[in-house]
Amino acid sequence: MSHTPVVLTPASADQAVSAFGDGSGVTVIGGGTIVMPEIAGRRASFSKALLLSGAGLAGITRQGGVVRIGAATTLQALIGATPDPLSTAAQRVGDYEIRGQATIGGNLCAGPGRETPRGDLQAPLIALAASVRTAGAGGEQVQPVEDFLESGPAGRLVLEVEFSEPTRGAYTSMGRPHTHVYTVLSVACAETPEGLRVAIGGAGPTGARAPSVERALADGASVEDAAARVLDDVEPQDDALASAWYRRKALPALVARALADIGKESG
Amino acid sequence: MKITVNGAEHELASPPLTSLLNALRDELNVTGPKVGCQGGNCGTCTVLVDGEPRRSCLLPLAMVDGAEVTTIEGLGTPKRMHPMQAAFHFYYGSQCGFCAPGMITASVALLERNPNPTRKQIQNALGGHICRCTGYVKIIDAVEAVARGESFDGAELTRSRGGEATPKGASA
Ligand SMILES: Cc1cc2nc3c(=O)[nH]c(=O)nc-3n(C[C@H](O)[C@H](O)[C@H](O)COP(=O)(O)OP(=O)(O)OC[C@H]3O[C@@H](n4cnc5c(N)ncnc54)[C@H](O)[C@@H]3O)c2cc1C
Ligand code: FES
Ligand code: FES
């Protein structure tokens, strides 16, 4: 780094919110597993860094059937302590050391990687019908995770995510072993209070919901027929992990498997 | 910023976003943790931060202010090795040695949280550590040996050079 950025280390959520302000010129560091390599590779330059690790934003609480997860909660802490599809998805990210440092807030805000998609918790959070509480210009805001992903994290500080406890959940993923097993495609489903929801990871820049699959199932389609509809919902891309052709072939089968895992009879 | 490294407290002058890895090596001259990828991918920079294995290349100093850091140097010395260091030596778990500082610290931490891991659990725990000499089988053998309670003392390690000694636990 040619210059030394100002580093803000808030000691509470309130301090973090006021330090963030409207977010202009501020780079948030959750776990830093994405930001630090950018700094080391001299691809990042910024004037202000906001470190969340001391701001008391980590923790999982449950009240009245609602699960709340602070933005700085590590992925390792989600394993076994949150319902599927989130728990299994967290378990499959990186390795023990990465999961112990990486945060859910950082995963939600992770843009597509330079060669591959990332943000493997996005699809599970969409399937769980999670909402995201953020701060920024105009104050606090709570919105569905899909809307948050659509508008992007710019100018927003994620404080927590919350969702109603599902009755069931399933996560199926296809990885490509590299130095780490990077997720080529993933399917997350959850039986939520508002019905069965299905979301896809690895096809598109962020996780995405699969409404055509959900509708087909609600209309009584077979698992195979409903799964095939997934290609109406997402447009798989070419990247360093797999071709779009391969993703189009594999995705319906993966959706069918996830639906079977959540207890949908095939037939 | 202050950190304790292998029992000694240090006040650091490096800027707060310096990685712990660079501060250890360049400011404190603790060169056990190796610079591999600087992207979290290879594991050679792994150290224990308050007992948990962490990639020191991914940790800004400001995140470890006040922490207790243990590097490979802090586990043992050539004369008084930590059992895991001795096991790596005895089982040829280290060839060029570049991955060993990370492999060994991560393995020590694994046995702290799971004293009797299966082979699969050892593989998973070391999944983020690359050995460019591809000595994985012997590395996992070494971790299993420590978990089994084999012990290695300095004299035996010297004798093992002649190919005579057997690990204590194995001969039992
Ligand atoms: C070896 C390795 C393997 C990996 N494997 C996977 C994998 O399998 N799957 C996967 O999904 N990811 C993977 N990753 C990427 C990454 O570790 C995770 O996505 C992680 O969850 C990112 O979280 P973080 O807190 O470390 O992010 P950070 O680096 O702290 O932040 C990432 C981005 O989000 C922003 N941000 C962070 N927190 C907030 C917040 N609260 N509010 C607003 N913005 C915020 C940052 O400014 C930055 O733009 C891997 C990374 C490494 C190094
Ligand atoms: S140098 Fe830290 S993981 Fe490679
Ligand atoms: S012994 Fe050479 S990298 Fe592992």
Image: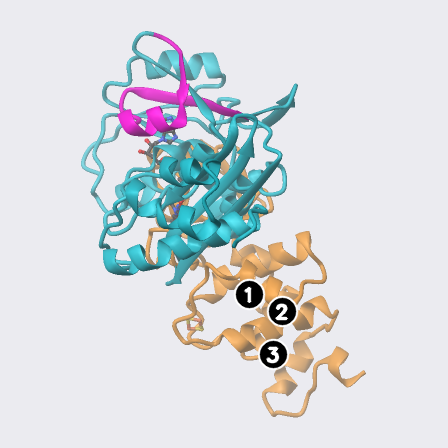
Q: Could you say which is closer to the camera, residue A34 or residue B89? A: A34
Chain B rendered in what hue? orange
Give the percent coordinates (x, y) of residue A174.
42, 57
Residue carrying label 2: B119
Query: In the image, is residue A170 above or below residue A175?
Result: above
**Contact (Cβ within 8 Å) of mark 1 with mark 2:** yes
Per the rendered image, the range of residues in magenta is A139-163
Work out whether disc 1 and disc 2 sit on a shared chain. yes
Q: Nearer the viewer, residue A60 or A40?
A: A60
Identify the residue shown where x is 70% and y is 86%. B166
Quick check: A104 left or right of B51?
Answer: left
State which quadrant residue A140 falls in: top left
Q: Residues within 10 Å of mark 1 (few under 14, many from 20)?
A: some
Foreground residue among B37 and B154: B37
Chain identity of mark 1: B
Front-most of residues B150 and B12: B150
Label 3 vs label 2, nearer the camera: 2
Query: Mark 1 to mark 3: distance in Å?
Result: 20 Å
Judging from the image, what is the letter of the chain drawn in cyan? A
Which residue position holds label 3?
A: B90
Query: Is residue A156 visible to us here?
Result: yes
Q: Chain of mark 3?
A: B
> Disc 1 residue type?
Gln
User: Farthest residue toward the left?
Assistant: A2
